[in-house]
Image (tube, grey):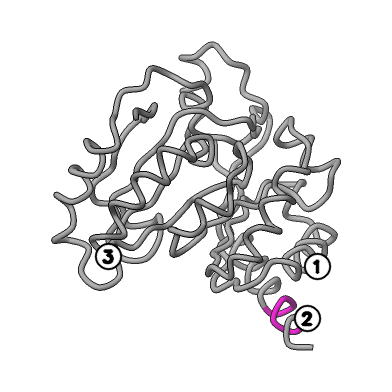
Amino acid sequence: MKASIDSIETFGLVDGPGIRCVVFFNSCKLRCKYCHNPEMWKMKENNYTVEEVFKKIMRCEPYFKKNGGVTFSGGEPLIHSNFIIELSKLLKKENIHIALDTAGVGLGNYDEILKYVDLVILDIKHTTEEGYKNITGHEIDEVEKFIKVLNNSNKPVWIRQVIVPDITDTKEYMNSLVKYLQKIKNIERIDFLPFHRLGEEKYKVLNIDYPYKDKSDMDKTKCQELYNEFIKKYKEETNK
């Protein structure tokens, strides 16, 4: 069995706890306007077998220590469910911690994948049908299906939200995000990621129009202030 993999990062520090080996899978159904990896949107040639990826990960195992492991990212790893399931079976025999960095929009079979996952890092695109469609070009239905399966799995969850000026940085959106996250179980951590235009050059190389070319980078100080206010309200609502 083979999969289309863009790259394998052997010393990741931001894609889950500890030191991670990060596997970036090609292909994604979404076309997020702020995506900084458009080169991974399309499926490319299947270039790695399960055994080849397993061996690469195991070479990194001495660096994992107590809280490191492997993270499946992309693109969208849920497009490659069968490959990930087979690879995860091998990794679990070696007690490797597995994180899944996903937007929750794959090809189904989510319950089987989540059997082997220790942590889900879920990217929230928007909280409303209209807002989600505007940012991703896709209906919100599939991620809603994934969230239901995720809740049934009782897996720990980290939330990531990109903060885009005038779109997801408003008071109205912050209030809607508080309510939206109430329906997701086992949230251990929430991160706000300030929008930036560092990926714009990739769009030019690929001859793709960059949707947010008229937007400025999100101010990091304002983003932190929003986060502080949000967390305070989120905790208040969660503890009611």
For the point 83% across and 49% down, the residue is 128
Residue on which disc 1 sits: 179
Q: Tell which circle, 1 or 2, labels the residue nearer the N-terminal end.
A: 1
Horizontally, residue 50 falls left or right of residue 217, namely: left
Mark sitting on residue 95:
3
* Magenta extent: 232-236
Tell me which residue sits at (52%, 20%) in the image: 203
Q: Position of residue 14 (x, y in %)?
A: 38, 56
Amino acid type of disc 3?
Asn
Q: What amino acid type is highlighted by mark number 1?
A: Lys
Residue that appears at 69% across and 66% down: 184
Camera-side residue of 131 and 96 = 96
* Circle 2: residue type: Glu
Residue 235 among magenta residues: yes
Name the quadrant containing residue 84: top left
The disc placed on residue 237 is 2
Residue 69 in the image, given as x and y percentages of width and height:
30, 59
Secondary structure beneath disc 3?
loop
Is tag 2's residue or tag 3's residue first in the polypeptide sequence? 3
Q: CA distance from mark 3 to mark 1?
A: 36 Å
Residue 209, image quadrant: top right
Residue 80 pos. (x, y %): 47, 36
Other-residue count near label 3 (Cα within 10 Å), few / some / many at <14 / 14–19 / ≥20: few
Q: Position of residue 92 (x, y in %)?
A: 31, 60
